Amino acid sequence: MLKKGSKLYSILTGTCPKCQNESMYLSKNAYNLSRIFEMHEKCSHCGLKYKIEPSFFFGAMYVSYGVGIAFGVAAFVISYLMFKTDLKTAFIAIIGALIVFMPIIMRVSRNIWINIFVHYDKNAVKK
């Protein structure tokens, strides 16, 4: 499931979607908020340019909406259905989860967005 060569591997690890040998981000820590969006210009292994066109990652905003909804629903299910809290507490849990996981959501959204357009090539490093 999480083998090198799968989209899920690249999305969850933040590695180059073409060769999956290098992290796309300068800082691996998503909670380093001053460097959250700083990326390498291109992959040092396969040469893939990450910013495919100007403003390429603006589309990741739409993906982040869906990912945020998924995190919010998960927070609601865990707090309201599993822990049997009232609705007010469940909504506070949703807000808390979205604030705490915002850096993760932003990075995962970028990873999903670039993986829509770039596919794994096992021979990319050899080229």
Image (cartoon, rainbow, N blue to C red):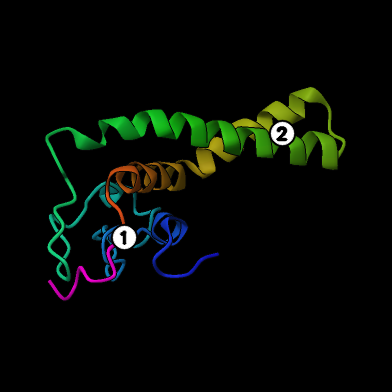
| Foreground pick, 104 / 125 | 125
Left or right of 13: which side holds 1? right
Which region is colored magenta? 121-127
Residue at point 51%, 44% (across, down): 101
Residue 13 place in picture, x, y as percent: 41, 62
Residue 5 x/y as whole percent: 39, 66
Could you say which disc has been placed on residue 76 in the image?
Answer: 2
- Please give the residue where the numbered disc 1 appears in the rendered image: 120
Q: Magenta stretch: residue 122 in it?
A: yes
Q: Is residue 74 left or right of residue 2?
A: right
Residue type highlighted by circle 1: Tyr
* 8 part of magenta stretch: no
Amino acid type at circle 2 is Phe
Label 1 and label 2: CA atoms lie apart by 35 Å
Can you give x and y, in whole percent of width and height, for residue 118 in the image?
27, 50
Q: Is label 1 in a helix, a strand or a loop? A: loop
Residue at figure coordinates x 28%, y 43% from the top left:
117
In the visual, does 113 lie left or right of 88? left
* SS of the residue under disc 2: helix
Q: Nearer the viewer, residue 51 or 4?
A: 4
User: Where, by quadrant of the figure, is residue 56 drawn?
Assistant: top left
